[in-house]
C-alpha cells in the first residue's frame, strides 16, 4: 500500500488539519526536501483540541532523514506553541531500520508516563517516521524489551474525540492469529444520533480487523439485528449465522464471544453483555454457554507493556463432560512468589472464567509448593477431597498440574493433600483436553 494511500486514510480517520508551520526558509534551494515532524500542540492539549500538530522543516536531501527526524523529535521548534512529546526524562537511546521496519529503543522513563502521554509519544514517533519513504512501521523498545510492536501511521489516534459528539474513539478487541489472546485496535468513527454507540461497535467487529497480525472474530455471514441497553446490560441480537458458522474449536469460540463482550464493556454504562440469536436465547455454542450474561475478561487482553505479567495457560471444566478446556490468561505476578506459585494461587481464586467452570472446589487452599529439578510438589488443603477421591478430585489435580507444566516451570507435578500423597508424577493429560 502506498504512502499516499496511508496519508489519505489518516486524513479521513483523524480529521487532522494538515496546515503546517514552515520552519525552513530556503524552499527554493534544489537540494532541500520537506520533513514533517509531529509535536504536542500545547493549546490543543490544554483545551481539548488537536493534541498534536505537524511542523515542516526543509532538510538538505543529502542528510539522513531518519537521523534528522529523531533529532527534531527530541527538541521543540523555536517558533510556535509546540512541545516535544518526549517528556519526563523519556529519551531515544538508539534505533535501527531494516526492510521498512523501524526499531527505537527508549529510556525506562517511557514506562512511567500515563496512558495519554504514551499515546502522544507513539503518535508523534509513528506519524513522523512513517512519513519517510523508507519507514513502514515503528516498534518501540525499552532497554531492549519490546513494548509496542509495528505501529502503523494508519491507526494513530491524535484528536480528542470526547469533545465532539459526532466523532467517537472506540476500542475493539480482535484475536491474535493463534487465538490465545485478544489484541486492541482503535478506530475513530463519525456517528449519528439514530444509533447506539454499541451498534457501531458490533458493526465494526463484523467488518473485521484492519491490522496485520490479528484476525477477525465474527463468523461468516453474521448480521446485527438489534442492540438494547438496559440497567447496565447490553443485549446483542445476532443472525443465525453467528451460531451456524461458529468456529470449531473451544479457543476460537471463546475469542469470538469475548471479542464482542470486551469491546462492548469498554463503553460507558455497559457492565455486562448478553446474546440473542434471531430474537431468542441460545445455549448452543458447543464449547461455551452463551445463554447468560457475560462480564469483561481482562486476563486475555494482550498488553506488551506489562513487564510484571505471567503469560500462562490454565485448564477449566466444560460442563459435566469430564474434560478440560485450555484457556490462555495473563496473570498479575506477585514478585515474592515463584511462577508456579503465582499460577496455582490464581487458579484457586477462580470460580468461573471465560465461560468455563473452575474444577477446583471453592475452599481449597495452597499449603505449600516446592520445585526440585523440574518436579513440582504441590500440597493442597483437604477441601480438595470434599466430594471424595474420585473423578472430580482427580480432574482437579490434573487441571492444576497441566497449568503448571504448560508454564514451563516443571516437567511433572505431584499433588499431595494435607501432606499425604494423592497423585504422583503427573505428566500426561492430553486425553482430558478439548481443543
Image (spheres, rainbow, N blue to C red):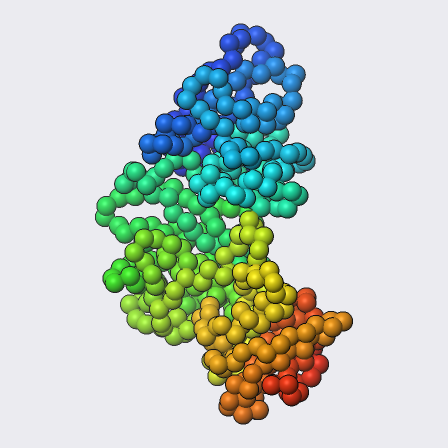
Task: Using the rendered image of the protein, determine whether residue 240 is visible from the camera's viewpoint.
Answer: no
Q: How many marks?
A: 0
Q: Is residue 195 left or right of residue 309?
A: left
Give the side of residue 197 with respect to residue 92, left or right: left
The quarter of the image holding the N terminus is top right
Q: Is residue 221 left or right of residue 179?
A: left
Would you place residue 212 above or below residue 91 in this image?
A: below
> Considering depth in this image, is 263 or 253 the residue closer to the camera?
263
Check the image and report above or below for 43 versus 186: above
Tell me the residue at 52%/43% (across/down).
112
| Residue 265 position (above or below residue 152) | below
- Pick the front one: 366 or 299: 366
Q: Position of residue 234 (x, y in %)?
A: 31, 61
User: On the image, which quarter does residue 263 sit in?
Assistant: bottom left
Q: Quadrant of the C terminus?
A: bottom right
Residue shown at the point (51%, 37%) measured from the top left = 122
Residue 198 visible? The answer is: yes
- Residue that sits furthest to the front in the current view: 336
Q: Choose between 400 and 18: the one closer to the eye.
A: 400
Task: Residue 187: name its quadrant.
Answer: top left
Q: Position of residue 363 (x, y in %)?
A: 48, 81
Residue extending farthest to the left is 194
Q: Position of residue 83 (x, y in %)?
A: 46, 26
Q: Position of residue 337 (x, y in %)?
A: 61, 65
**Residue that extends furthest to the right in the rendered view of this protein:** 373
Residue at point 71%, 81% (across, down): 425
Residue at point 59%, 27% (across, down)? 70
Amino acid at each position: 500500500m502506498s504512502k499516499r494511500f496511508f496519508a489519505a486514510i489518516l486524513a479521513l480517520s483523524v480529521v487532522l488539519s494538515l496546515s503546517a508551520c514552515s520552519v525552513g526558509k530556503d524552499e527554493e534551494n534544489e537540494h532541500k526536501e520537506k520533513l514533517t515532524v509531529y509535536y504536542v500542540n500545547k493549546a490543543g492539549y490544554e483545551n481539548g483540541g488537536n493534541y498534536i500538530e505537524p511542523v515542516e522543516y526543509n532538510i538538505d536531501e543529502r542528510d539522513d532523514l531518519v537521523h534528522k527526524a529523531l533529532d527534531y523529535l527530541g527538541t521543540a521548534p523555536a517558533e510556535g506553541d509546540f512541545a516535544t512529546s518526549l517528556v519526563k526524562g523519556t529519551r531515544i537511546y538508539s534505533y535501527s531500520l531494516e526492510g521498512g521496519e523501524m526499531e527505537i529503543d527508549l529510556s525506562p522513563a517511557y514506562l512511567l508516563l500515563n496512558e495519554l502521554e504514551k499515546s502522544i509519544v507513539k503518535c508523534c514517533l509513528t506519524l513522523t517516521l512513517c512519513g519517510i519513504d523508507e519507514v513502514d512501521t515503528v516498534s518501540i523498545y525499552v532497554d531492549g524489551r519490546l513494548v509496542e510492536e509495528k505501529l502503523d501511521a494508519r491507526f494513530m489516534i491524535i484528536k480528542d474525540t470526547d469533545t465532539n459528539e459526532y466523532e467517537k474513539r472506540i476500542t475493539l478487541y480482535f484475536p491474535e492469529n493463534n487465538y490465545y489472546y485478544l489484541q486492541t485496535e482503535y478506530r475513530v468513527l463519525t456517528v449519528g444520533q439514530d444509533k447506539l454507540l454499541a451498534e457501531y461497535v458490533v458493526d465494526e467487529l463484523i467488518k473485521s480487523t484492519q491490522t496485520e497480525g490479528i484476525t477477525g472474530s465474527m463468523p461468516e455471514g453474521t448480521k446485527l439485528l438489534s442492540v438494547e441497553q438496559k440497567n447496565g446490560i447490553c443485549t446483542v441480537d445476532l443472525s443465525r449465522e453467528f451460531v451456524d458458522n461458529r468456529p470449531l474449536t473451544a479457543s476460537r469460540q471463546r475469542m469470538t464471544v469475548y471479542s464482542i463482550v470486551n469491546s462492548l464493556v469498554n463503553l460507558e454504562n455497559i457492565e455486562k453483555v448478553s446474546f440473542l440469536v434471531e430474537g431468542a436465547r441460545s445455549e448452543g455454542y458447543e464449547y461455551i454457554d452463551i445463554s447468560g450474561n457475560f462480564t469483561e475478561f481482562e486476563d486475555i487482553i494482550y498488553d506488551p507493556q506489562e513487564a510484571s505479567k505471567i503469560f500462562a495457560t490454565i485448564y477449566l471444566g466444560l460442563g459435566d463432560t469430564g474434560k478440560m478446556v485450555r484457556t490462555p490468561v495473563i496473570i498479575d505476578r506477585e514478585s515474592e512468589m515463584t511462577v508456579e506459585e503465582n499460577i496455582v494461587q490464581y487458579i484457586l481464586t477462580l470460580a468461573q472464567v471465560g465461560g468455563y467452570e473452575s474444577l477446583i472446589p471453592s475452599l481449597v487452599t495452597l499449603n505449600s509448593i516446592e520445585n526440585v529439578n523440574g518436579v513440582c510438589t504441590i500440597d493442597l488443603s483437604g477441601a480438595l477431597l470434599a466430594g471424595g477421591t474420585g473423578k472430580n478430585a482427580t480432574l482437579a489435580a490434573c487441571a492444576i498440574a497441566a497449568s503448571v507444566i504448560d508454564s514451563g516451570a516443571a516437567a511433572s507435578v505431584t499433588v499431595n493433600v494435607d501432606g499425604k500423597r494423592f497423585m504422583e508424577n503427573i505428566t500426561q493429560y492430553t486425553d482430558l483436553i478439548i481443543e
